[in-house]
Amino acid sequence: MLTENTTAAGRTELVRRLIPDLDHRPASIEQVSRLPSFLSVLRACEQTLGTPYSAVDHEVQDTLVLRRLQQMVHTVRLNPLWRERLAGAGVPDTPATYDEWQRVPLADKDTQRELFMGERPGLVVPLTRGGFEIVASGGTSGGLPVETVYSLRELQDTYRLAGDFIGRHMLAPHLTGDDPKWLFTTLADYQMWSSGTMVGGVLQSVPGVNYIGAGPVGTAVIEQMFSYPGPKALMGITAGIAILTELGAGMSRPAKESFRVAMYGSGVLARRKRAELKAMYPNLSILSYFAATQAETIGLQLSESSAWLAAVPGLHLVEIVDDSGRWVPEGAEGELVVTRLHAHEAPLLRLKLGDRMIRRPRTDEPGLRTQRFEFAGRSGDVLHLGDTQYAAARAYAALRDRLRAGRVLDLDEAAHDVQFVNHRESKLLTLLAAVDDVPGAAYRLDEALGAHGVQRAFAESLPLSLSVYNQWEADPVSIAKSGYRFDLRFVPRDSPEIEHTAVGKVPLVRDRTTDWTAR
């Protein structure tokens, strides 16, 4: 049996047994269709080492994943479009190291459309052979649909792998006792445009729980579900979790106490809303479940004590990269890039999902060894003021901290939602904040700062959102000379002025490159 002190030669021998040379470089489409699933490889690894894969030491995981990536590179080279793409980027025939792997060009949503929509020329195994599932995203940021093609056999494998990890590392500490255990989701699972199709498949595969795919619910349905005896967990989009304070107001005390875990989808849940949820549900832990339609489980928050997200070992290769596609160092922010490891028939290498992450140290606990990272915002969450781009999440944080320090108000406490609206043509940047007491908040802001004070607060906060590498681009004086006007405006809760996506998310930034109404 291999141990923590296994030599590099021993690790190489192991992974060569797990993915033998004949499978490592498939010679034909027919052979690709018959390749052993990567889940079967992971299970064989577990059996050999006598431990769950998520507990296998990092050196073995890294060696096995690199072997799998090499296999994927050999597989995609059976497709002429991929062959040309890799040759143009100077990717070695067999990337021998992760450094060489980083030469593989990044793919974005446009690449995905080109390869997997229309005639789907990026497939290795054609659709005519059957056994595929098409899942589509409406495009939260750009609004254009994107389709992804999955092998059904491999899709079910990923559901089992992620479901087992969620049950073991995310839910087990909370869903305790002898009563039945419940896992609900309020994601819509009835249309191909919904990530509920994917996440629902994962949640159904969590062992030891009773699953209910409720979809969007009202008060009567949520009260019925929460009346069942036993501890409960619920997963939904951020807005779907936030509304539980309203839907659960009439629940009995035992029903509220049985709610143990709320998992919210990609994004950020306001601190005020967290406080309201915990006041209503006294035993509740609120954790992030970060996913996308193209990758149904990317990162999971395992504890409220840390916002860092953990990857499911063996599910995806998660990379945090700079503008050149190279890995950023620990503690640095970069673009989230995902390669699905379970994709023989329809591989898609190094896909940018449109999110920013901070790379964090890997966890090295005896029972869990995996990558970790922290959500920093959407890639589209950028404020364009002239030729300078400001990170909207950091700009908001700087403005919030300034208002908090001046004892004006705490936006995290007061606001249900916030959204920047950038009228580029008329040079007006407005931060909308949805609050319960609009007149009171406006009065406090005006008394403390006045119109000129708001201008000054924005001008002093925006430079703090620039990275250390481009802080020289702007200072309060240059921002004042830009001609931009700034406004912090309070609106009622659920105001139509704050725009939502089709699935209820609130984008942090809305750009108005042409603004007729502001003229």
Image (spheres, rainbow, N blue to C red):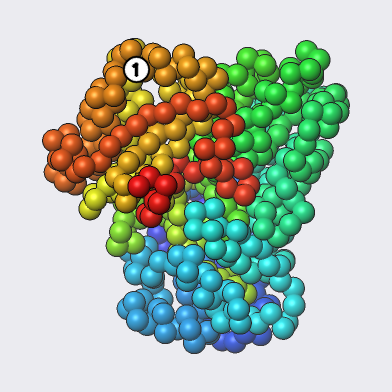
Give the image location of residue 458, x and y in percent.
27, 31
Along the line of sight, the residue nearer the viewer: 82 or 480: 480
- Name the residue: 61% across, 36% down: 239
Residue 91 in the image: state x and y as whole percent: 36, 76
Q: Compared to 396, does 102 lie above or below?
A: below
Label 1 crowd bin: few (<14), some (14–19), many (20+), radius 10 Å? some
Q: Quadrant of residue 97?
A: bottom left
What residue is shown at x 54% (from left), y 63% (from top)? 144
Which residue carries the number 1 mark? 446
Q: Quadrant of residue 193?
A: bottom right
Horizontal placement of 137 versus 217: left or right? Answer: left
Left or right: 284 with respect to 377?
Answer: right
The answer to whether any part of residue 366 appears in the image is: no
Q: Is 279 above or below relative to 25?
A: above
The answer to whether residue 51 is left or right of residue 415 is right
Element assignment for label 1: helix
Q: Where residue 145 sits in the image (x, y, percent)?
A: 58, 64
Q: Does 153 appear above or below 183?
A: below
Q: Residue at x 40, y 51 (%)?
A: 516
